[in-house]
Image (spheres, rainbow, N blue to C red):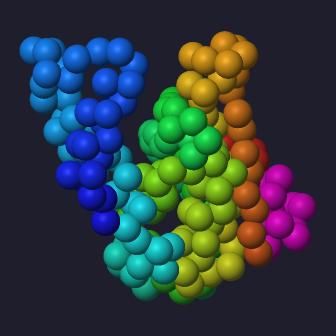
Amino acid sequence: MVDTKEIEKHVRGIIKAIGDDPDREGLRETPERVARMCAEVFEGTGYTNEQIAQMFNKSFGMSTSDDIVLVKDIDCFSYCEHHLALMYDMKIAVAYIPRGRVLGLSKIARIADMACKRLQLQERIGTDIAEIMSLAADTPDVAVIIEGRHSCMSARGIKKPALTKTITLRGRFETDEKLTNKLMNMM
């Protein structure tokens, strides 16, 4: 879990290192605020993909079919593991083919949110969500499509805003071109 006292100590040190006074009025409570923020935005770090799947595997019975369940436009954000920079304006779409059971729709959004609450790469977010969904829904047939912007590109370095899109396909979405095309037409 997140060690807030350790974060407070280091944030205070960062404030000093950039040449500011951590005891001045506007910064006095900043280490504590940053530590609370970190506990919230990095909550997913304290759980494995298997544990997240167990937390959000509430499902309901249904007849077996080849219907695609798609939840899209899930708003999320994460932090780049290379610069601790914000990945923002992320829209995540998660699709799966149920095998006799369907997950509660809110569980899919919660899975996406929890996978993002780690130091991440956008590519790994898609892989993590696909793995968690496969475990939670007990199906190998999962697709995750993510579009996002990265402040490590737009606010620093090259300073070029760009949209990054990643597609993670598992099971039949990876091998059945007709099924994949059906999914892309639903997007």
Q: Which residues are magenta?
A: 172-182
- Residue 5: x percent and y percent? 20, 52
Q: In this rendering, would 111 be left or right of 32?
A: right
Quarter placement of the C terminus: top right
List the single residue furthest toward the left: 25
In this rendered view, identify the residue nearer to me: 183 or 109: 109
Instruction: Please count the marks in the image.
Output: 0
In this rendered view, identify the residue nearer to me: 18 or 176: 18
Q: Is residue 134 above or below residue 89?
A: below
Dominant SS in magenta: helix
Question: Quick check: can you spot residue 6?
Answer: yes
Question: Quick check: can you spot residue 91?
Answer: no
Quarter placement of the N terminus: bottom left
Q: Is residue 181 magenta?
A: yes
Q: Residue at x 59, y 76 (%)?
A: 134
In this rendered view, identify the residue nearer to me: 77 or 58: 77
Q: In this rendering, would 162 be left or right of 95?
A: right
- Residue 172: x percent and y percent? 79, 73
Q: Residue at x 74, y 50 (%)?
A: 167
In this rendered view, identify the residue nearer to me: 157 or 78: 157
Q: In this rendering, would 151 be left or right of 112?
A: right
Q: Is residue 52 above or below residue 180?
A: below
- Residue 183: x percent and y percent? 73, 54
Q: Residue at x 40, y 19 (%)?
A: 18
Q: Residue at x 22, y 35 (%)?
A: 31
Q: Is residue 98 magenta?
A: no
- Residue 180: x percent and y percent? 81, 58
Q: In this rendering, would 36 be left or right of 77?
A: left
